[in-house]
Image (cartoon, grey):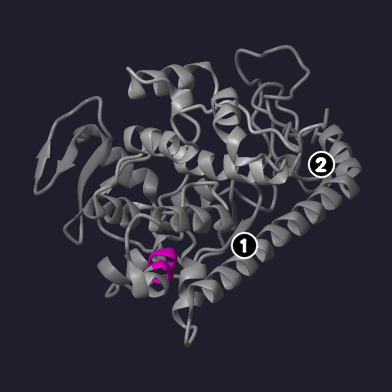
Amino acid sequence: MAVAIGSIGDFIEDQKNWPTYVERLEQFMIANEIADGKKVSVYLSVIGRKTFMLVRDLVAPEKPATKTFADLCEVLKDHLSPEPLVQTERFRFHQRSQKHGESVLAFYADLKRLSTTCEFGAELGHTLRDKFVSGLKCSHTQNRLITEKNLTHKKALQVAVEVEIAAKDTKVLQGKNTANYESENAHYVKRDAARKCYRCGKIEHHPDKCWFKEKYCLNCNKRGHTKFVCRSKPHHRRSTQPRLGRQQNCTREVEKSVAADKVASKFLSNIQVAKVNENEVSVHATDIIWIPVKIAGKVMEMDTGAAVSIISNKDYQKHFKNEKLTPTAIKMKTYTGEPLKPLGLLPVEV
């Protein structure tokens, strides 16, 4: 007994459409040189039990074996694959767009499948090209295709595949470069993580460049670190005041320059805690603290934790450009230690 070439398998209605299955069945019979007199027997043997029972019901009261191979194929075609409505099939075709994660080739193949029942005729090439370009997810590929002259659907597919492959290769190369960089610099990362600044506890800098190098600890009153990393026992009060030295802090110099202590002593006795709400000032104790002082008719926000009151040059030009700045020797630093040089002091009447 000769061994059959290939395997056709049972027909499964929810996985394959009937015309496609019939094409496979015909090729199976050709490959195995099935005679015309045996085609019905082979047909009824390979379609599976469920499909056989369906054929039996459709040709009743006659027996399936009394029909020809062509008759049996036509019976199931009329039942499983009725003639589709052209309008519906075209709507389904034009609604199709490339899905997330779907390759260009897979998208094009499905468009070709959908077009077989649309009866586009001579317009198939142009219609397929236009829908393929408009349905792509990648806008870069679309822009590339739009600029192509004499573009056909085959040329559009070729260009789109090339762009897709190039994009994938670029991601692969970038991934390798990133992996190499991380591997080569892993020991630096571990080394820096192990070197934590003993002055402030951070790891972004060396202790010699720490901003707290010359500052006094609020816990032990010693210079060179913060209270957060202090190893001394907690002190409830500071016994002595730290010596300021030549470089005085910002608060003292500002107080001397604009006599802020005198101004504050007179003004703070009548402080109102308020919030600016559009053009009105309303009292809200839980909101931002606003001081309704009159500085060129402007209201300023109070920051109880700031050593000095600072505005940007942009605000100065906008609100106080007619007021003259006075030189200052104040030296300030940001929280992370970067130097900050003021443009000058602005003595104002509060």
> Is the residue marked by circle 2 packed among few (<14), some (14-19), or many (20+) residues within 10 Å?
many
Using the image as rendered, state which of residue 249 and residue 241 is in the foreground.
Answer: 249
Of mark 1 and mark 2, the one earlier in the sequence is: 1
In the rendered image, is residue 92 in sight?
Answer: yes
Seen from this angle, which residue lies furthest bottom? 149
Secondary structure, mark 2, is: helix
Q: Does residue 202 appear left or right of residue 238 in this picture?
A: right
Q: Quadrant of residue 87?
A: bottom left
The amino acid sitting under disc 2 is Pro
Q: Quadrant of residue 346?
A: bottom left
Image quarter hosting the N terminus? top right
Span colored in magenta: 128-133
Secondary structure, mark 1, is: helix
> Is the residue marked by circle 1 packed among few (<14), some (14-19), or many (20+) residues within 10 Å?
some
Q: Where residue 73 appears, x then y in whole percent?
A: 44, 37
Q: Does residue 67 appear left or right of residue 240 in this picture?
A: left
Seen from this angle, which residue lies furthest left? 280
In the rendered image, is residue 343 in sight?
Answer: no
The residue sitting at 67% across, 21% down in the picture is: 219
- The secondary structure that most of the magenta stretch takes on is helix
Q: Where residue 141 appears, x then y in whole percent?
A: 52, 69
- Residue 209, numbered label: none
Q: Does residue 224 appear left or right of residue 332 in this picture?
A: right
Using the image as rendered, state which of residue 168 and residue 349 is in the foreground.
Answer: 168
Residue tagged 1: 164
- Residue 207, numbered label: 2
Q: Is residue 160 above or below residue 48?
A: below
The amino acid sitting under disc 1 is Glu
Magenta stretch encompasses residue 52: no
The residue sitting at 59% across, 23% down in the picture is: 45
Whole-angstrom CA distance, mark 1 to mark 2, is 50 Å
Q: Where residue 94 appears, x then y in whole percent?
A: 32, 57
